[in-house]
Amino acid sequence: MTSPSRNRKLVILIAAVLSGAAIALCIGVAFPTPVANPALGADWQCHRSAGIVTTCQRVSHAVPSLHRAIVQPVVLRRV
């Protein structure tokens, strides 16, 4: 027959292993690593999260605006 202290140690060990795995998974999801995918081309940016999931998104290039609206000051004086 197993003693209650041995069962308690086993439960603590299993809880420590599961919490360590959960922390590693959270870190892997929080900090994805960039992945080069030459098949998609330069317009795509891919990231691998937790070594399992790879997501890709199209990179849109910002077009500079040539025409800026001129802001007129507001005058709050009564005439």
Image: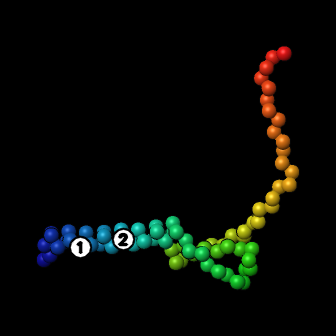
Name the residue located 23 percent from the left edge and 73 percent from the top edge: 10
Q: Position of residue 16 (x, y in %)?
A: 30, 70
Q: Is residue 48 left or right of residue 65?
A: left
Inspect the image, locate mark 1, and give the three-letter code of the amino acid beneath it.
Answer: Leu
Pick out the residue farthest to the right. 67
Q: Residue at x 81, y 39 (%)?
A: 71
Q: In the image, residue 41 lies at what x, y percent?
A: 74, 79
Residue displayed at 42% across by 71% down:
24
Is residue 29 toward the left or the right of residue 38 in the image?
Answer: left
Task: Farthest residue to the bottom: give it.
Answer: 39
Q: Quadrant of residue 13?
A: bottom left
Q: Which residue is mark 2?
A: 20
Determine whether, in the image, residue 32 is placed left or right of residue 78: left
Crowdedness of circle 1 by 10 Å Cα count: few (<14), some, many (20+)? few
Q: Earlier in the sequence, mark 1 or mark 2?
A: 1
Mark 1 lies on a secondary structure that is: helix
Comparing labels 1 and 2, the label whose residue is closer to the camera: 2
Nearer to us in this view, 76 or 8: 76
In this view, 71 is above or below 55: above
Q: Residues within 10 Å of mark 2 (few under 14, many from 20)?
A: few
Q: Residue at x 75, y 66 (%)?
A: 60
Residue where numbered disc 1 is placed = 10
The amino acid type of the residue labelled 2 equals: Gly
Q: Nearer the viewer, residue 9 or 44?
A: 44
What separation in Å lies between label 1 and label 2 (alpha carbons)? Answer: 15 Å
